């Protein structure tokens, strides 16, 4: 499992990019800071899909994804196997200029995450920043039209003190004509780093500044050399990259147009929309259209598991609930019989004993694993039992589940699924309900006598 924090994000990003671009499909999972702002929120069998969407939109707007998992599955050529590469990202809404960002937690979510090994120190100290498209546009516009004085006015008290202290050290260093060794300065935020860059470069033509993670290095150079270095440097894009953070991965996922796999994925999609793309629209149809544009091919393993149950008796497929951990345990134990000759999933053996449910990286791996096994069963049913003797191609596996593409499971719903790329199933809400007691019926007069 590759754990990605702010400190190693830039170094690992090329590997993430390569894994996504070469993937046959990608499984995802998210852990959130909460999902219920209303304590009395209950799903009803009589909700329409619009009702359900609006209720969830209202409830999740104040919460965020705090951990995001991605597992890429690469089909190994000439082998009946997929190679899985998993990444787990801690995400934190870092402060950005022009906006006072806030973070809300549901106490039950804190307790749940703690019980399943979530590291709150890594979240707070090492969480990766992100912005949605609206905030990215505001930042870009501000960088084009802003100047040093304008940026200084946006610094917090601590940032301003850090800026003044660093600038004072640079002045002393420059005044010492005998000192030629580079000067290293510790900075507390990317904004201080950026403003120092701008201020020093504007005021001194015989120095140059480079950046590390939380520091800058100042060196003495000739004025001619500074002109050449200016042409090769782009401070604004570097600063924007810091704020974008995980949003670059989201853009990469979307632009790749690879098949996305999730388990009970509706809330994951809603959070991704509001956190990395745009605020959730008031229109349910617009939400569906946006998600389909971002990710044209999505499979929900929760929905697939319901369809799979229709192919077998309860004795053959005996899971009582189809939560992700139950499905994974089934397909790694007794379910191996029904998935004979299915593709092997190659994962780093060093980490196999550390599997942890409800950790976003691991859950994305489990989700992709379950998808492969279920796709193989559908494939055998579609193309015949001969596939138990020969290897099914990736295209055959995907073809076997194409009827279920973009069908998203709806929990406790009269309409069992949401169709992202077309019309939702017809609502079959009855006009009347006939309620029958399981216990022997009693004469109503007996109740009247009892309570009189």
Image (tube, grey):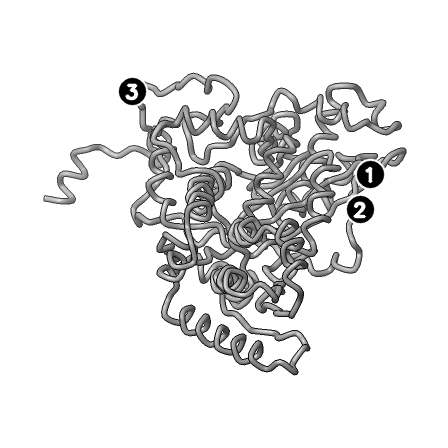
Q: Is residue 255 above or below residue 166?
A: above
Residue wearing tag 3: 432
Please tell me how crowded label 2 is: few (under 14), some (14-19), or many (20+) other residues with Cα within 10 Å. Answer: some
Give coordinates of residue 448: x percent, y percent: 14, 38
Residue at image point 46% right, 27% down? 288
From the image, tell me which residue sits under label 2.
Answer: 346
Which numbered disc, 2 or 1, marks the residue that appears first in the sequence? Answer: 1
As drawn, 27 above or below 112: above
* 101 sits left or right of 371 in the view: left
Residue that sits furthest to the left in the current view: 452
Q: Quadrant of the C terminus?
A: top left
Tell which tag, 2 or 3, sits nearer the viewer: 2
**Location of mark 1 (residue):** 81
Observer-side mark, 1 or 3, equals 1
Ranked by sequence position, the earlier of labels 2 and 3 is 2
Residue at the (62%, 80%) spot, across then down: 177
Picture layout, residue 84 above or below residue 229: above
For image coordinates 83% across by 34% down, the residue present is 341
Q: Position of residue 209 (x, y in %)?
A: 61, 64
Residue 115 visible to the viewer: no
Q: Position of residue 220 (x, y in %)?
A: 65, 70
Give left or right: position of 436 versus 289. left
- Label 2: state its secondary structure: strand
Given residues 376 and 141, the one toward you in this image is 141
């Amino acid at each position: 499992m590759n754990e990605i924090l702010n400190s190693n994000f830039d170094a690992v990003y090329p590997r993430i990019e390569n894994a996504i671009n070469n993937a046959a499909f990608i499984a995802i999972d998210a852990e959130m800071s909460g999902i219920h702002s209303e304590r009395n929120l209950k799903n009803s069998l009589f909700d329409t899909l619009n009702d359900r969407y609006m209720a969830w939109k209202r409830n999740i707007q104040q919460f965020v994804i705090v951990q995001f998992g991605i597992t890429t599955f690469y089909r190994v050529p000439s082998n009946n196997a997929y190679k899985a590469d998993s990444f787990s990202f801690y995400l934190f809404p870092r402060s950005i200029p022009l906006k006072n960002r806030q973070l809300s937690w549901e106490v039950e979510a804190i307790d749940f995450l703690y019980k399943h090994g979530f590291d709150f120190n890594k979240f707070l100290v090492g969480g990766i920043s992100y912005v949605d498209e609206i905030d990215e546009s505001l930042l870009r516009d501000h960088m084009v039209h802003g100047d040093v004085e304008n940026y200084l006015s946006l610094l917090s008290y601590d940032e301003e003190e850090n800026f003044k202290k660093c600038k004072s050290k640079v002045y002393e260093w420059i005044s010492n004509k005998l000192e030629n060794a580079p000067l290293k300065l510790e900075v507390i935020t990317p904004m201080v780093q950026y403003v120092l860059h701008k201020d020093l470069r504007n005021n001194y033509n015989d120095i140059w500044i480079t950046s590390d993670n939380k520091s800058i290095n100042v060196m003495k150079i000739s004025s001619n050399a500074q002109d050449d270095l200016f042409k090769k440097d782009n401070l604004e894009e570097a600063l924007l990259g810091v704020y974008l953070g995980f949003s670059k991965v989201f853009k990469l996922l979307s632009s790749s147009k690879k098949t996305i796999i999730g388990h009970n994925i509706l809330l994951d999609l809603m959070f991704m929309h509001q956190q990395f793309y745009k605020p959730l629209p008031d229109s349910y149809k617009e939400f569906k259209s946006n998600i389909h544009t971002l990710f044209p091919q999505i499979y929900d393993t929760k929905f697939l598991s319901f369809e799979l149950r229709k192919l077998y008796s309860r004795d053959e497929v005996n899971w009582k609930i189809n939560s992700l951990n139950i499905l994974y345990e089934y397909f790694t134990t007794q379910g191996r019989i029904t998935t004979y000759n299915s593709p092997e999933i190659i994962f780093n053996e060093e980490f196999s004993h550390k599997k942890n449910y409800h950790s976003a990286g691991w859950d994305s791996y489990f989700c992709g694993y379950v998808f492969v096994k279920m796709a193989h069963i559908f494939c055998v049913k579609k193309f015949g039992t001969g596939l138990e003797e020969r290897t099914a191609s990736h295209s055959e596996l995907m073809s076997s589940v194409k009827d279920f593409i973009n069908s998203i499971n709806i929990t406790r719903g009269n309409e069992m699924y949401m169709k992202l790329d077309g019309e939702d199933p017809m609502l079959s809400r009855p006009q009347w309900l006939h309620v029958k007691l399981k216990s022997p019926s009693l004469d109503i007069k007996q109740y009247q006598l009892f309570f009189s």
